[in-house]
Structures are given as C-alpha cells and as structure tokens.
Image (cartoon, rainbow, N blue to C red):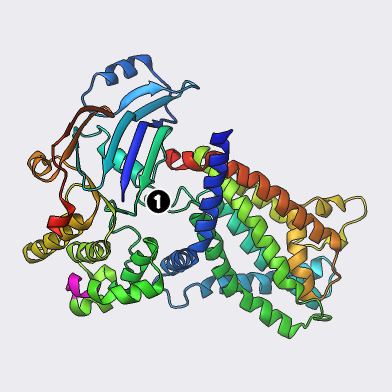
C-alpha cells in the first residue's frame, strides 16, 4: 500500500513540476516548429496555406453535393477542419511523445509530463497559425450572432484538457507496445469520416443520430464550434466533454502512477 | 549536507522483441562484459545492470567508479541522476545534483550561441532572470566572441562543446556526476577548462566519476568502487575524506 501511495505521490509531483516548466516546453515546442520549417520562407504558414486550399476547394464542392448553403457550409468546414487538425495531430503524435524524446529522457531527469505539455504546445502553435483562416472565413461570412463567443475559450480549454490525459495515456502505452501508434492512427483516420467535419450532425436522421451522439470527437468539436459560429449551445456536449475529462484524467493519472518509473526502461 | 545512500539498489533492463534462447543465454553468461542476463517474474529476459548495490557517500567523498565496459558504471550514474528509478531497493539522495552526462543535449543548430545558452539554462531549470545574470560570465568563458551571435550550426564541434561546457560549469552543485573526466576544446581552452572544472569539483560536496583512467581515480578519489556485472566486487575507502575547506 505504501508503495502505491509513493507512486501516486511521485506521479503528482511529476505533473506539477512538468506544468511549472512552461518556459521549457514552450521553448522546445517553438524549436520543433521552427526546425520543421527551417529555411522555408513561409515557415509554419505553409500549414495555413494547405488548410486554406483544402477549405477553399472542398467548401463549394461539398456544399453543393450536400445541398447546403455555401456560406454556412464554408463556416462549418473551416472551423471543423482546423480544430480537427489540432485534435487529430495531438492524438496521432501522442504515441511518439516519449519515444521521440528518447535522447532527452535518457540523459536528463525531467518530469515525463514535460513531453506531453510540449506536444500540446506544439500543436497549439500550429493551431494559432491555422486560426487565421477561421478569422478570414468569419469576416466574409459573419456568424448569426456572437453572444456565446465567450464560451469558445472554455470549450477549447476543455478539449485541451481531454487531449492532455489522452496523450499521456497513449504515450505511456505506446512506449511499451509499439503497435499502439499504428492502431491509433488508423482509428483517427476512420474517425475523420465518422465525425461531423465534412458533414453536419443535423443531416443525420433520428436513426443514425447515434453516430454523433456517442462520438466524443463530435462533442469536442461541438463545444468549440457552436460558440464560434453562433449555433445553439447544447448542454449535452458540455456535460459529455466534462465527464470525459474527469473520468479520463483519473484513469490516465492512475496509469501514469503505475507506469511512470518504468517508462525510461522501455525506450 | 549532502549524501547518497543506496540499499539493495537493483536495475534491470527488459529485453523486448527477443525470446529467450537457452543456448544463447548460456553463452552470454560467460562473457566478461555486460550486466547479468536473468529472467524476471514474468519470465522475460532482462539485463541486470545493477545488482543489489549497497553504498553510502557523504560530504567530502570523491567516488571513483571503475570496471569493464558494461559493468554498470554509466547506469549507476544515470540512476543517481534520477534518469532511471531503481526496480528494487532504496536510493536516497540529498543535495542538488549536477549531471555532466549529455552536456550538449537540447542545443539547437538553428539559433544563435547566445540563445542556446538560454536554452540549456531552461533545460537545467534556471529562470530567465537567473540566466540573465549568468549569461555574461558564460559567454566570456566560452570565448567565442562574435560567433555567439551566429547560429550554432556555423560552429565547429569543438566550439559547440566549449559553449555547452561553459553553461554546464557555470553553477555550483552539491553533487556532481561525471562519465569520464570532461575535457573539451583546443589546447588553450583545455587548460582554462580544467581550472574551472577543478574549481567546480572542489566546491562540490560529493563527486561521483566513472572512468577507465585508473591513475586519475587513484589520485583523485577517496572511495573507489570496482563494478563487475553490475555488482560491487571491490570497495575501497581511503582513511581521510577529501578536505572541503582547505581546497576552497
């Protein structure tokens, strides 16, 4: 029992000390972003461009295909795609959060959560670049109303919290079982089509509605998207995301307490 | 006061993607290098890199670790640095540790030498303000002049090491861990680096150094641990500990 308490205590300390090292993980995240686009003139704005091209090309076509009003469909697609990119990249990169940091982990004793914070920070940096598109689209096609916009940062925070526990859990498991990242990237790919990104949840009939209702990714997108686009706010999505945050964090933390000390050995 | 106490300290590395072949295991058991191959509770092959170590180091101890390649010297340093947690046994460390393992870790070729100083500082957990107060001393010691304002990738490897060394040796620590005595730079720099490193080492309360240089260990250390297959086969403690006061 004593051993267990100690493990939990150490895991909590890792988490707190990791969070405190924000200047370190922001610096590492920037460094990685810069390295990925080194000596390219546009740098990370290349992602912005490729997302913009995708939105611009897909928007009118799929809007017509799905019989939607182009303006509102473009709004929906731009916001959905951009936040989906953030969510999916965070999940996909989780598997290698520790594996890619092997050089660090084996040479310096930093809190392991530092590498999870760094992953989220890196994807937030990319999100900030992409967000320019959201701004442009919303300027051209203004949302119906802006009175719920204050909920947007809260929704984003809630999603980030959920991504954090999921990333930590996936990073731990993936370090030991190297098949997990492959499995996860497969699932994420399927999830793209099963989540209301290209399509909208209200296109579903009552019979197929469960595809959205039981899809956590739908609720994640919903709590970010609805306040931005002035769509009705559904409490269910907020409750779903909040409950998932509490439950997921608990499971993830317990797994962390159990596996933390073993992780460097698995690299 | 600083101390390091270990009781029954054991470290085992699991070997995955490799099923235990009896014959191979047998033949491996007889070689002079490497940790002991064993099986853990769930029958996985493990390399027992450190096997039930007991030791205590106190203020003033200069500890030399000697042994074959793979005898566990570096692993022991990594455990003391907090990189690996022991699988079994106890390890208590009191005092601020400076680990000289991987001193150029995290340096970025695309940013200037000056920014790299800050980057290393962040890795070591120093605040921006603290680095601001240290950066001048570090820059001056590294002696790289205007190169400090150029990206690190324009440096020769020796120059990059000088920078890393200067950051690493810029703050005193209670406990210093070293894998081989550090020596960087050209003839001129080596000399001044040695003075600085010796000063740092003299100020530290405990120093643990792994080396193949027996003469240096004999001369510098009052505690000598001889490791073999992850076990302490010989432990020798000279009568008097290193005198902290007289050397400062």
Find disc 1 in the rendering and name its residue.
A109
On the question of residue A168 being in view, the answer is yes
Residue B85, image x, y percentages: 42, 40
In the figure, A141 relative to B100: above or below?
Answer: below
Residue at screen point 63% across, 52% down:
A165
Where disc 1 sits, the SS reads loop
Residue A103, image x, y percentages: 37, 51
Q: Which residues are magenta?
A: B139-144
Residue at screen point 13% across, 37% down:
B239
Location of the C terminus of chain B (image quadrant): bottom left
Q: Is residue A108 left or right of residue B175?
A: right
- Read off the chain for label 1: A
Q: Is residue B173 left or right of residue A246?
A: left
- Circle 1 packing at 10 Å, graded few (<14), some (14-19), many (20+), is some
Residue at screen point 47% across, 20% down:
B43
Magenta stretch encompasses residue B234? no
In the figure, A60 relative to A28: above or below?
Answer: below
Residue at screen point 18% across, 53% down:
B244
In the figure, A109 relative to A178: above or below?
Answer: below
Task: List the single residue furthest toward the bottom.
Answer: A139
Q: Is residue B90 left or right of residue B217?
A: right
A51 vs B172, nearest the viewer: B172
Asked where in the image residue B126 lies, by quadrant, the reply is: bottom left
A34 vs A109, nearest the viewer: A109
On the question of residue A173 being in view, the answer is no
Residue A155, image x, y percentages: 73, 66
């Amino acid at each position: 029992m004593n051993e267990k308490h100690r493990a939990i205590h150490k895991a909590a300390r890792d988490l707190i000390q990791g969070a405190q090292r924000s200047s370190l993980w922001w610096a590492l995240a920037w460094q990685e972003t810069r390295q990925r686009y080194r000596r390219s003139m546009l740098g990370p704005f290349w992602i912005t461009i490729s997302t913009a091209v995708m939105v611009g090309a897909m928007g009118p076509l799929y809007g017509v295909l799905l019989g939607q009003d182009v303006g509102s469909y473009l709004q929906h697609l731009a916001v959905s795609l951009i936040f989906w990119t953030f969510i999916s990249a965070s999940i996909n990169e989780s598997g290698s959060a520790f594996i890619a940091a092997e050089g660090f982990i084996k040479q310096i004793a930093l809190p392991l959560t530092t590498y999870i914070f760094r992953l989220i920070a890196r994807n937030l940096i990319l999100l900030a670049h992409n967000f320019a598109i959201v701004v442009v689209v919303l300027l051209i096609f203004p949302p119906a109303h802006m009175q719920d916009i204050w909920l947007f940062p809260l929704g984003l925070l809630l999603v980030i919290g959920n991504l954090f526990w999921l990333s930590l859990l996936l990073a731990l498991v993936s370090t030991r079982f190297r098949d997990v990242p492959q499995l996860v990237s497969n699932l994420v790919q399927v999830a793209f089509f099963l989540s209301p990104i290209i399509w909208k949840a209200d296109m579903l009939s009552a019979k197929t509605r469960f595809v959205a209702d039981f899809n956590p990714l739908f609720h994640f997108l919903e709590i970010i998207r609805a306040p931005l686009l002035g769509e009705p706010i559904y409490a269910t999505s907020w409750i779903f995301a909040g409950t998932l945050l509490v439950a997921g964090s608990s499971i993830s933390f317990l797994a962390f307490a159990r596996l933390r000390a073993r992780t460097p050995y698995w690299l | 006061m600083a101390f390091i106490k270990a009781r029954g300290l054991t470290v085992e590395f699991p070997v995955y993607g490799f099923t235990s072949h009896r014959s191979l295991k047998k033949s491996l058991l007889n070689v002079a290098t490497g940790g002991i191959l064993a099986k853990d509770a769930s029958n996985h092959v493990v390399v027992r890199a450190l096997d039930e170590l007991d030791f205590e180091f106190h203020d003033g101890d200069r500890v030399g670790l000697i042994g074959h390649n793979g005898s566990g010297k570096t692993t022991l340093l990594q455990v003391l640095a907090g990189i690996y947690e022991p699988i079994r046994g106890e390890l208590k460390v009191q005092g601020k540790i400076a680990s000289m393992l991987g001193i150029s870790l995290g340096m970025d070729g695309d940013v200037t030498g000056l920014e790299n100083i800050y980057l290393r500082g962040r890795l070591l957990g120093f605040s921006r303000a603290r680095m601001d107060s240290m950066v001048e001393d570090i820059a001056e010691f590294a002696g790289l002049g205007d190169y400090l304002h150029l990206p690190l990738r324009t440096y020769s490897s020796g120059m990059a090491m000088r920078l890393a060394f200067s950051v690493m040796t810029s703050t005193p620590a209670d406990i210093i861990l070293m894998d081989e005595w550090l020596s960087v730079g050209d003839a001129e720099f080596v000399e001044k680096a040695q003075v600085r490193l010796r000063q740092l080492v003299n100020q530290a309360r405990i120093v643990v150094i792994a080396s193949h240089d027996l003469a240096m260990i004999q001369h510098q250390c009052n505690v000598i641990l001889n490791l073999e297959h992850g076990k302490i086969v010989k432990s020798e403690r000279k009568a008097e500990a290193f005198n902290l006061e007289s050397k400062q």
